[in-house]
Image: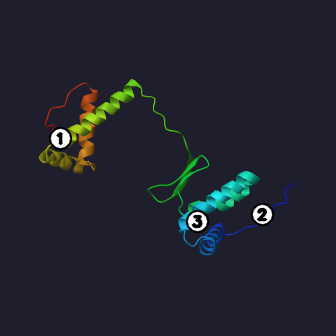
Amino acid sequence: MSNLVAIPIDEKAFFNQLVEKLAKEFAPKLTKTQVQKALNQALAAFKTEYETVEFQITLLTRPAYSLGLTGKYKGRIHQRSKSGRYYSKRYRKPRNPRTAAQVQTRTNFILASQAYQTESESVRMLWRNKARKLQMTGRSLYMQQYIKLLSQGTTPPSPFLP
């Protein structure tokens, strides 16, 4: 039986006070962010050594979100969405199988990008005007149409007009 006792505390306030105290007394040359990172690393080492899951939940997970900390920690990615909400997902190593279809798609993308860069400013302006009605950028619309033709086996004309 464990002799740990759960005491409800305001995690954000506790964590902030701890960071303030450490920053003032022990590490005056460090920024608060550096102290927070060092504290998180120390708490992670403590958790690993003593396997106290409750400690991680109350001191690392919730304060990390409330303080706006993001990044990779213990095999998870902590991020902020466009709407401002924080979320966590499991980290997965990126794959690159280099299949024939993938290589062809990347080649088409490179060709479309290079073609857009060589187009004159007047042609780009035509694409921007057309794209504005579709709530897109001119480059995005150009790339979409150019890649569509390339994937059908057709070489787009130069200049490529909308």
Q: Is 117 situated left or right of 55 in this image?
A: left
Q: Residues within 10 Å of mark 1 (few under 14, many from 20)?
A: few
Q: Determine the residue positioned at 23% across, 47% down.
A: 138
Q: Is residue 129 above or below residue 67?
A: above
Instruction: Decide: is 75 above or below 62.
Output: above
**Secondary structure at numbered mark 2:** loop
Q: Quadrant of residue 33?
A: bottom right
N-terminal label among 3 and 2: 2
Q: Position of residue 112 (x, y in %)?
A: 25, 36
Q: Which mark is residue 136?
A: none
Residue 24 percent location from the top left of the image: 60, 75
Residue placed under numbered mark 3 in the picture: 35
Report, in whole angstroms, how far the alpha carbon at label 3 lies from the one at label 2.
26 Å
How did the renderer colour the structure? rainbow
Q: Amino acid at mark 2?
A: Ala
Look at mark 2 in the image and give the residue it sits on: 6
**Which residue is more in the foreground, 27 or 39?**
27
In the displayed image of the protein, which residue is found farthest to the right? Answer: 1
Identified by mark 1, the residue type is: Thr
Q: Which residue is mark 1?
A: 118
Residue at 34 percent across and 33 percent down: it is 106
127 to the left or right of 97: left
Q: Give me the residue at 24% from left, 30% from top.
A: 149
Asked whether, in this view, residue 118 is left or right of residue 10, the answer is: left
Q: Is residue 51 visible?
A: no
Q: Quadrant of the N terminus?
A: bottom right
* Secondary structure of the residue carrying numbered label 3: helix
Label 3 – label 1 distance at C-alpha: 49 Å
Quarter of the image for residue 30 reads: bottom right
Q: As drawn, is 129 to the left or to the right of 88? A: left
Dot in front, 2 or 1: 1
